[in-house]
Amino acid sequence: MKTKTVKSIESNRVTIFDTTLRDGEQSPGASMNQREKLELAHQLADLNVDVIEAGFPIASPDDFEAVKAVALAVKGPVIAGLARCVKQDIERCADAVCHARKSRIHVFLATSAIHRRYKLRKACSEILKMAVDGIRYARRFCRDVEFSPEDASRTEPDFLAQIVEAAIDAGASTINIPDTVGYAIPSEFGRLIGSLYETVPNISRATISVHCHNDLGLAVANSLAAIQNGSRAIECTINGLGERAGNAALEEIVMVLKTRPESFQGAWTAIKTEKLYKVSRLVSRLTGMSVQRNKAIVGANAFAHEAGVHQDGVLKKRTTYEIMRPEDIGIEGSDLVLGKHSGRHAFQHHLQRLGIQLSAREMEGAYQRFIALADKKKKIYDDDLFMIVREGMADSTRIYRLDYLNVTAGTGTVPTATVRLCKGQQVLQDAACGDGPVDAALKTIDRMTGIHGHLLDFNLQAISADKDAQGEVSIRVQFGADIVSAKAASTDIVEASARAYLNCVNRLLTIREQARGARKPSVKARRA
């Protein structure tokens, strides 16, 4: 691939724009509540991302409050909100991000022929005017305005260059070129970015960013091709989370630049790579979206060697089969282990080491859950601590709480589950039979809540070492038109299954309650 040196760009630093809280949350079933979004935002700031896109404020009251909370509490990165080129969107976004020390309004408008004809039903001249008007209006509230021509990779090159030039003249300081549907291939996407530097006369006045989707598995490759052709900002997500097949994975882009800088004209990022693994696990816990074992960089097998030849080579010289060190992304040689005799001070120290910040009340609740777990298993690992904290986050939106579970199962026995739930001061109890102990427990919960779900995915894995490890259950459940994901863990896998399912029920009820209380209709947009 031909590389291109762009003299108008003064620095080779690549800005990392993280959109896990916005585009990542658009993954079916990956919704996070405000407390979870705030926790993740703090960790992204600790990771040293440059920009956090905290949400789409006009989408719902909950989205607005979450963006506002992040803007108020998180220091360091620029806090951005998404808006269409519509006055109401821009005003709502401005109200949410104005509390940040560094704020940005990110406006977008579709530009491709297929979107102009079938979605917007507008001519090029109308699109151009809407973009310019939207940017100028956003500039009334915020000096830092970003513009995205949605579906840029399928937009006619001449019109794309025209609208980019107009957007910069209107005051956009960042122009994002999205491959909205993951249609581009690296060679053509790189050429597209290079052509903008050659044909847009005022391009030196803006930072050129890209936002690539992974529908063909090329999001990271396209993003890297853009860097080779002059782009110095990348929009990405932790674990590649996002709409449909996801977005470019932050951890992959960052580690490619760190491992192969000579191929990218020395381009670099300010990301603290030793924190990547921790944040990856946190996103997985919060969203209920498991990371595949063979996932690049952060997958469980990324640094595993089973073949004898590989093991022999690594023992003799690590670099024979490892081009990165596990320590580079934060995988330590061993977890620090807690036990039932560890006190509050040691517990708090471990949480601080993991970058977890809790209030005094939350810390006490987490410590009590830690003590309860320590009575069941000998050693408490880092992943156990993440789960303990996550359970506390779920408590804030918990409508039903599992109080008691007893199952009977075995050869020649009809599997039966007896479940007791608490709903406020109300105590509910029932029993049901099923094809197995998990099925019986879930059917009992269905009967008690009156909400019947269809299990789409069920995954079980140990979250730490030893025979007494907690089993982590990850599930996706369909309730009518809604699909919800959740996780739970316990040393009893039937209990973990029941808790995960109940977490899905609680999350569904919270979503529906928010929808009923929404003052404006949701416009959960689908964009780059």
Image (spheres, grey):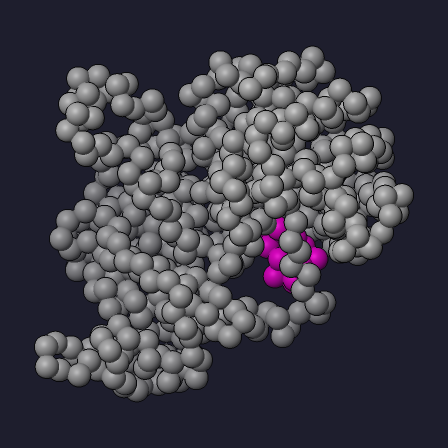
Q: Is residue 385 part of the magenta span, yes or no? A: no
Closer to the camera in the image, 474 or 392? 474
Residue 299 falls in image quadrant: top left
Closer to the camera in the image, 63 or 134? 134
Residue at the (26%, 72%) spot, across then down? 438
Residue at the (52%, 21%) spot, across then down? 268
Residue farthest left in this picture = 411
User: Does residue 111 appear left or right of residue 509 in this picture?
Assistant: right
Closer to the camera in the image, 92 or 256? 256
Return the x and y of residue 258 as percentages of the image width and height.
45, 22
Return the x and y of residue 415 as percentages of the image width and height.
19, 80
Is 316 drawn above or below residue 447 in the view shown? above
Q: Assign the magenta stretch its main secondary structure.
A: helix
| Image quarter in which the N terminus is found | top right
User: Does residue 134 appear left or right of residue 528 in this picture?
Assistant: right
User: Does residue 246 appear left or right of residue 357 in this picture?
Assistant: right
- Is residue 349 in sight in this rendering? no
User: Does residue 510 appear left or right of residue 282 in this picture?
Assistant: right
Closer to the camera in the image, 285 or 289? 289
Return the x and y of residue 406 as percentages of the image width and height.
21, 78
> Magenta region: which residues?
55-69
Is 18 drawn above or below residue 521 in the view shown? above
Residue 308 falls in image quadrant: top left
Is 260 drawn above or below residue 413 in the view shown? above
Residue at the (68%, 61%) spot, across then down? 523
